[in-house]
Image (tube, rainbow, N blue to C red):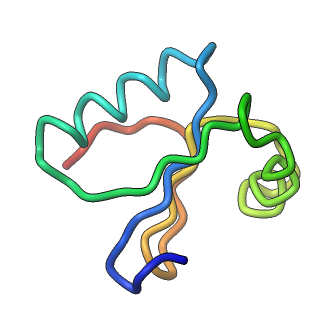
Amino acid sequence: MTTATEAVLYTHPDCEYSAALKAELDQAGAQYREINLAEEPDFWAEVERLSGGERITPVMVEGELVTVGFHGVG
């Protein structure tokens, strides 16, 4: 279960953008819970819901804010 301040990051190991976002978050010391879709494929339905029907990673959820894709940590 996540807290209101904990971000959830949906990733896939074959996705370079997932790795880039994780590296930036780790460097910034950000707290997040990673859901690796290769290990937990049941979460693809949630990713598709969040991304408007696409199977894309990374997807990061911070409270009500959903960020699809990698845009850099700003």
Closer to the camera in the image, 29 or 70: 29
- Could you tell me which quadrant the N terminus lies in? bottom right
Looking at the image, residue 5 sits to the left or right of residue 60; the answer is: left
On screen, residue 46 above or below 5: above
On screen, residue 63 above or below 19: below
Q: How many marks?
A: 0
| Residue in the picture at 86% in, 50% down | 42
Q: Residue 11 at what x, y percent from top left?
A: 58, 36
| Residue in the picture at 62% in, 37% down | 36
Q: Residue 51 at what x, y percent from top left?
A: 73, 54
On screen, residue 62 above or below 37: below
| Residue in the picture at 12% in, 49% down | 29
| Residue in the picture at 59% in, 47% down | 35
Q: Residue 24 at what x, y percent from top left?
A: 23, 34
Q: Hey, which quadrant is residue 58 in on the image?
A: top right
On screen, residue 25 above or below 45: above
Q: Residue furthest toward the left?
A: 28
Looking at the image, residue 63 sits to the left or right of residue 11; the answer is: left
Looking at the image, residue 41 sits to the left or right of residue 8; the answer is: right
Q: Residue 48 at what x, y percent from top left?
A: 83, 52
